[in-house]
Image (cartoon, rainbow, N blue to C red):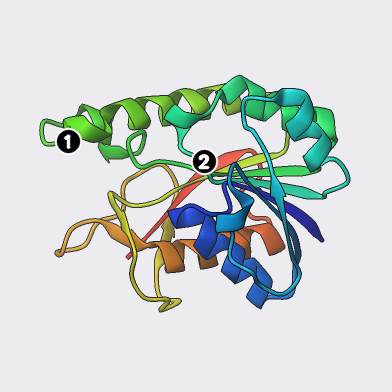
């Protein structure tokens, strides 16, 4: 499969890029600063601007799958979706956020009293992106939400998958960038959540 990864130099994007490369996929890795993209086998680094729909669509053209790992507040959600559709990609996988997950029945994590103010803007935009995708008629999308704490860690391969409910343990709610990357690439290789959101956590 030919894969385009937008945001390939970021925290999640760089781990996803390594996972894809390690599994032998051909990847066009896109970032504003391509010199910051890791030099890995089967990876071609390209400069791209997420606010340039035509330029982005041109970079994405010819790829079977597009993965988006860019912050929601640092992109235009509609431009991303339109660029993927214009490029004719068969599938679109999005690195989502945890804020739109249910912390309790009918209560989103973003609406809980302890949700940090610093993350509210990003979480709200993530929820908007999910709503936009759910209204798409033609795009085969998947939105993978991490757990509440999404941070560097180890690649263990041991995690749980869920749907719209936040996954928690007695130690809280978390997933490493490395294990998140495994879950996303697993979904890319063997689609199980077409036109759905799902979540990953310990």
Question: Which mark is nearer the camera, 1 or 2?
Answer: 2
Q: Up-down: is 200 above or below 134?
A: below
Cα–Cα span, label 1 and label 2 = 20 Å
Q: How many numbered discs, if any?
A: 2
Residue farthest to the left? 113
Q: Residue 199 got which mark?
A: none
Q: Up-down: is 138 above or below 67?
A: above
Locate residue 160, reporting x and y percent. Answer: 40, 65
Residue at image location 75% in from the left, 49% down from the top:
65
**Is 200 displayed left or right of 106 in the figure?**
right
Q: Secondary structure at mark 1?
A: loop
Asked if the residue at tag 2 contacts the one at tag 1, i.e. Cβ–Cβ closer than 8 Å, the answer is no
Query: In front here: 165 or 7?
Result: 7
Residue at image location 32% in from the left, 36% down from the top:
99
Query: Residue beneath label 1, please?
Result: 116
Query: Residue beneath label 2, please?
Result: 70
Question: Which of the 4 image quarters holds residue 77?
Answer: top right
Observer able to see residue 195: yes
Locate residue 64, reporting x and y percent. Answer: 82, 50
Q: Quadrant of the C terminus?
A: bottom left
């Amino acid at each position: 499969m030919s894969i385009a990864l937008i945001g390939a130099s970021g925290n999640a994007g760089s781990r996803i890029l390594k996972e894809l490369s390690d599994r032998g996929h051909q990847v066009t890795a896109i970032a504003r600063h391509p010199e910051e993209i890791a030099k890995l086998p089967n990876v071609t680094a390209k400069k791209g601007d997420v606010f340039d729909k035509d330029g982005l669509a041109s970079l994405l053209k010819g790829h079977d799958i597009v993965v988006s790992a860019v912050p929601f507040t640092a992109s235009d959600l509609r431009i991303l979706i339109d660029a993927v559709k214009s490029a004719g990609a068969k599938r679109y996988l999005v690195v989502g956020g945890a804020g739109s997950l249910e912390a309790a029945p009918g209560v989103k994590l973003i609406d809980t009293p302890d949700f940090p103010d610093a993350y509210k803007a990003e979480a709200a935009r993530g929820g908007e992106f999910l709503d936009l995708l759910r209204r798409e008629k033609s795009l085969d999308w998947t939105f993978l939400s991490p757990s509440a704490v999404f941070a560097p860690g180890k690649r263990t391969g041991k995690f749980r998958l869920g749907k719209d409910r936040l996954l928690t343990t007695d130690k809280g709610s978390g997933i490493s960038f490395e294990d998140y990357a495994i879950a996303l690439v697993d979904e890319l290789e063997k689609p199980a959540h077409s036109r759905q959101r799902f979540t990953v956590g310990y």
